[in-house]
Image (cartoon, rainbow, N blue to C red):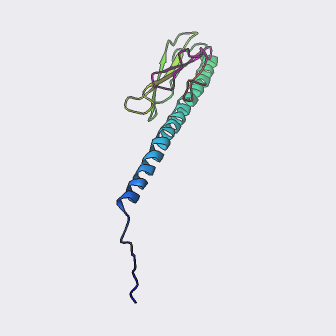
Amino acid sequence: MHRFRNESAGFTLIEVMVVVVVIGILTMVALPSYNDYIIRSRIAEATSALADGRVKMEQFFQDNKTYEGGTCPPATESFTYNCSDLTNTTYTITASGRAGSNVAAFSFSIDQANTRQTISTKSGWSSVTLPQNCWITKAGGTC
């Protein structure tokens, strides 16, 4: 008696195609979530530096009775910082996303009155009416 052995020599084309499709679907779902996570972490870096810059400006004002000569936060890998409107009584610190980075579409600012503002051109991250005193930190335009 002969026994027939049906030995498999590898994967069939259909099995490989199913695996490729499953990996493609997982990538389509996971990659945007991962990118949003990275953007949120870099935004936290910028808003933290702005808040710290505000504290340092207020300390400078307490010591010198002017904001003129106050220092800006140092640039980071993702954001550059600019201090403008430095007068005796006013200042504005702006964090702008570096060109070519995934936060290039973001700009955050704070002033002496603790007014926070967000400017974003990234789809899904800005709302039609931005809150007047808010830094957008999540997709959907929420603070």
| Image coordinates for residue 107, horizontal then vertical, percent | 48, 22
Magenta stretch: residue 117 in it?
A: yes
User: In the image as oriented, which residue stretches furthest toward the front?
Assistant: 1
Q: Would residue 103 be seen by someone viewing this image from the given angle?
A: yes
Toward the viewer: 45 or 53?
45
Residue 33 as seen in the image, left or right of residue 7: right
In the image, 142: left or right of 86?
Answer: right
> What residue sits 38% from the left and 72% below the top?
8
Q: Residue at x 56, y 11 (%)?
A: 90
Indicate whether 20 appears above or below 45.
Answer: below
Q: Residue at x 51, y 22 (%)?
A: 126
Which residue lies at the image location 37% right of the left edge and 68% below the top edge?
Answer: 10
Q: Residue furthest bottom?
A: 1
Please say whether residue 95 is visible from this viewpoint. Answer: no
The residue range painted magenta reads: 108-133
**Depicted 9 relative to depicted 52: above or below:** below
The secondary structure that most of the magenta stretch takes on is loop
